[in-house]
Amino acid sequence: TVHQFICRTDNYGVLVHDSHTGTTLSIDAPDATAIADNLKKRGWQLTHILTTHHHADHVEGNLELKEVFGCRIIGPEAEKDRIPGISQTVKGGDVIQLAKRPLTIYACPGHTLGHVAYHFADDYLLFAADTLFAMGCGRVFEGTPEQMYHSVNQFRDLQAYTSVYCGHEYTVANARFALSVEPNNRALVARAAEVMRLRDQGKMTCPSTIADELKTNPYLRCDSPEIRRILGMEGASDVEVFAELRQRKNTFS
Ligand code: ZN
Ligand code: FE
């Protein structure tokens, strides 16, 4: 069971519970109070925090939650010195057992150099945090656009119906930008209208699916003739198109 809520301003809190083993995971710890309240609502005991990267809005609740629940904190080896309370490190390519299921770790350098994503392949769940957003991707702070291109595009081959959980509710802003570079993509036009309606009703727009992202996310569509025409980059490589898209998004409003 996955329980999702919004905390801070636009961070997603995500709790994952397995009733057979009693395992309860929090994907990152943006807000200890909000996470504890939501655990209580569900009657769940937190057993693990899966940290994706070191940014404050993803680790700020670590120590408080560890103190209250005695949970284990799993996070990327490359950022272990910046993740409070970390008890176990992982790196891209690792597969660990959690709740009697294989959990695959993906390296996602770009937003931060050590950013990882977590994939429960048996349950078709991807926790992509600030790497892959609905119709968007994270800002490239520490890595290169080329690294980010590979981090985002490595998910294209996951099962189409895999649920994609993101770190932030940025979907409307992402949809507006996506429309500006691919206005005639019908799937995108329809999805943009849908997410704007959801947000007007105060509802969450995530999780997404890999299938929807492949159809609507410009960062997974660097080969789209329309995007290339609008950017004036018909002869460029996919990585070059990606870099230009990400650059334009930084100043788009
Ligand atoms: Zn971040
Ligand atoms: Fe974040």
Image (cartoon, grey):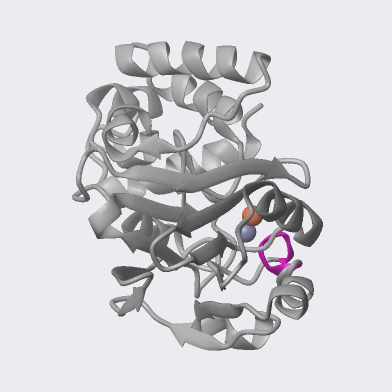
91 or 4, nearer to the observer:
4
Residue at left offset 66%, top offset 15%: 201
Left or right of 55: which side holds 187? left
Residue at left offset 57%, top offset 43%: 4
Whether residue 251 is visible: yes
The magenta-colored residue range is 56-60
If the picture is divided into quarters, which one holds ligand 2? Answer: bottom right
Does the magenta-highlighted stretch encompass residue 43? no
Residue at left offset 42%, top offset 18%: 191
212 or 239, nearer to the observer:
212
Left or right of 101: which side holds 197? right
Can you say whether 89 is above or below 160 in the image?
below
Q: Main secondary structure of the magenta part?
A: helix
Residue 249, how many percent across, how many down? Answer: 56, 37
Can you say whether 12 is above or below 196 in the image?
below
Residue at left offset 46%, top offset 26%: 178
Whether residue 185 is visible: no
118 or 150, nearer to the observer:
118
Residue 116, how many percent across, how many down? Answer: 45, 68
